[in-house]
Image (cartoon, helix red, strand yellow):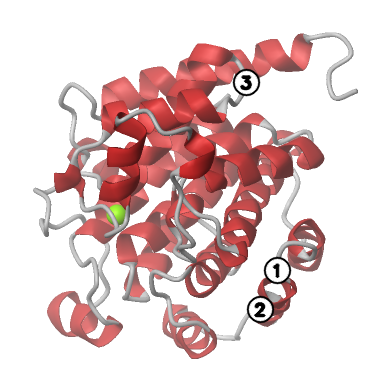
Amino acid sequence: MDGFLGSVIGTVVGDALGMGVEGWPAFLISATYGWLDHMVAGPQPLGAYTDDSEMMLGILETLVSKGDFDPEVCAQRFVANYHPSRGYGGRIAGIMQRLRRGDPWQQVGTDSFGNGSAMRIAPLGAFYFDDLKRLKEMARLSCLITHKHPEARAGAIAQATGVALALQAHCQGKPLAIDRFIGIIQDQIADQCPQFAQRLEALRHPPKGDRDSQRQALQRAYRCDVRSIEAVPPALGAFLWTSTPKQAIELAVNLGGDTDTLGAMAGALAGAYYGYSRLPSAWLETLENGPRGRDYILGQARLGAQRLIERLDQPGRGD
Ligand SMILES: [Mg+2]
């Protein structure tokens, strides 16, 4: 399924594009690159992905091995995959340490309101795209492993629901209706964090004009930083206001701030909607391809898509 593959690989190319300018303000990106549209080296070598994709892989591998989401297995995958050099947030090291010494996954998370639970969630959104109620529960559990703040939870559910709706539209061959898309996400998160739902309102009004007007409008509305409530909405906007995966991911990254995560989230949404085959080939070719690089991730994504098809074929599903 092209949309499932797209949400996984879209995360990784968006992450790798944003990596080169991670933490840069937008004016510095403009001054250095004009409009950044190609991968550059940064804290990681050219084409390398960061913690966003490494943790996304943990969720994907859990779905592949279990045919369902299991937070305990996922927590172990996070530990097994953990390479601190991939640029993790400050509180992750302690969580990994507590998991490694055998603490239960329910007890290791912190009260962080960061975007770390949303940045990695693409495979869940794609896997439960047909069942938003179940998706919400699985997104909540996946978030709790590391993040216990309601804003982080709302961000994870919002991003997962966005990926699911994007994949639904992909499968139906339908254009996206922005108001409906935002309304469904707001309904999913209103009981978790009403102010997060309210914060999505600005996305209903795309600015007239070019990519610079879009960039300015998103920057005026959101800080685009590591806080989930400031990062998930502009990533959704970068997807909803553009009309190709290249435009969506570039707009997200050129917002500046937490660029790798903005790129990863916009890439997950755009990949699910437009499909893997529409991701820019120049980015795919630049992507790292070592033992856990592009070909490995693509292989896992194909297995994940197979698992999804098996789940959809089960009689009585969703009861
Ligand atoms: Mg990162």
191, above or below 315, in the image: below
Figure disc tally: 3
In the rendered image, the quadrant that contains the N terminus is top right
Horizontal arrangement in the rendering, residue 238 relative to residue 292 (left or right): right
Horizontal arrangement in the rendering, residue 60 relative to residue 66 (left or right): left
Instruction: Residue 133 in the image: state x and y as whole percent.
Output: 80, 41
**Residue nearest the observer in this picture, 176 or 306:** 306
Q: CA distance from mark 1 to mark 3?
A: 26 Å
Res 41 quadrant in image = bottom left
282, above or below 81, in the image: below
Badge 3 amino acid: Asp
Q: CA distance from mark 2 to mark 1?
A: 10 Å
Horizontal arrangement in the rendering, residue 181 relative to residue 98 (left or right): right
Horizontal arrangement in the rendering, residue 76 relative to residue 140 (left or right): left
Q: Secondary structure at mark 3?
A: loop
Residue under numbered circle 3: 68
Is residue 279 at all visible to an observer of this figure?
no
Badge 2 amino acid: Arg
Q: Earlier in the sequence, mark 2 or mark 1?
A: 1
Q: Earlier in the sequence, mark 2 or mark 3?
A: 3
Mark 2 nearby-residue class (10 Å; few <14, some 14–19, many ≥20): some
Q: Kindly check if marks 1 and 3 are in contact, taking CB atoms under 8 A apart as contact.
A: no
**Residue nearest the observer in this picture, 304 or 134:** 134
- For the residue with label 3, is its CB less than 8 Å from the closest atom of ligand 1? no
Mark 1 nearby-residue class (10 Å; few <14, some 14–19, many ≥20): some
Residue under numbered circle 1: 193
**Residue nearest the observer in this picture, 209 or 306:** 306
Residue at the (54%, 22%) spot, across then down: 63
